[in-house]
Image: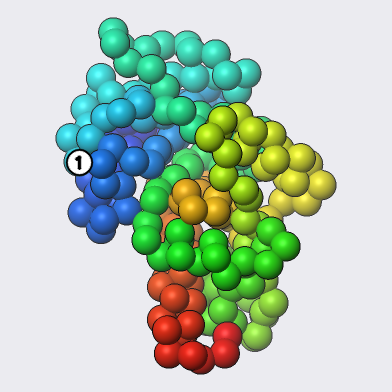
Amino acid sequence: MHHDPRTHLAAAARDFYARGWMLGTAGNLSARRDADAFWITASGRPKDQLGAEDFVLMNLRGQVVQAPPGRKPSAEVAIHEVVYRHVPDAQVIFHVHSIEANLCGHFAQQGRLRLPTLEMLKGLGVPDAEPRVDLPVFANHVNVPRIAEDMDRAFAQALPRVPGALIHQHGVTAWGPDFLAARHHLELLEYCFRYLVQAKALAIGV
């Protein structure tokens, strides 16, 4: 990325705030600066008003490299570290708290949410005609590093088939090799969640 990723992260945050996905300072976004460091949103900042001073530079060992005065990294920084360590081509990570993502956590069985067999899955890297794709769903813990530990164990065994993961009653995390891809992946997962919620409401089997 040739431009300062903080500019793109702030723009993405405004977009997601407007969609109702990052209300009340919730959610967090990050982008790699290089192989060992990434910028992440600072904790407790309104996502429609982010500036360059609202980002903290972290390394993959959980250490702060650079932080503006009075800023600390998002509490969910450990989740970003896990994705960057396990997914080499992940350059951008978006973690948002949408209503549909949180409703869909209730549809999961044994830590997996079966995604609908939609054409949209092609945009998530699944070319099959009627794919059977499960999104991993992790338990929510007040202690966020515990969530990251669960994800670390799961990803060490097998990476998700699609570039995302759900945390029950918390939110969805999506990633990609650049800003546009990460946004597309998040939008497509949110589309699947919206579809599932409406299908359940209409009593349509999915």
Percent position of residue 137, x then y: 62, 56
Image coords of residue 195 (percent x, y): 44, 78
Image x and y of residue 59, in percent: 55, 19
How was this image coloured?
A: rainbow
Give the position of the C terminus as an image quadrant: bottom right
Instruction: Give the SS element for disc 1.
Output: loop
Q: Amino acid at mark 1?
A: Asp
Q: Residue at x 41, y 65 (%)?
A: 100
- Residue at the image point whose x is 62% and y is 38% from the top: 147
Classify the position of the N terminus by image quarter. top left
Answer with left or right where residue 185 lies relative to residue 20. right
Picture residue at 57% right of the left edge, 70% below the top = 107
Q: Nearer the viewer, residue 91 or 200?
A: 200
In this rendering, position of residue 132 left or right of residue 182: right
Density class for disc 1 (Cα within 10 Å; few <14, some 14-19, many ≥20) is some
**Residue at the limit of the structure toward the top, as seen here:** 69
Q: Quadrant of residue 106?
A: bottom right
Q: Is residue 205 left or right of residue 181?
A: right
Return the x and y of residue 153 as percentages of the image width and height.
76, 40
Which residue occupies the foreground of this view, 113 or 190? 113
In the image, what residue occupies the spot 63% across and 72% down? 114
**Vertical relation: 30 (above or below) 107:** above
Who is closer to the viewer here, 17 or 36?
17
Q: Residue furthest left?
A: 49
Residue marked by disc 1: 48
| 184 lies above or below 10 | below
Question: How many numbered callouts?
Answer: 1
Residue 16 appears in the figure: yes
Answer whether residue 4 is visible to the viewer in this image. Answer: no
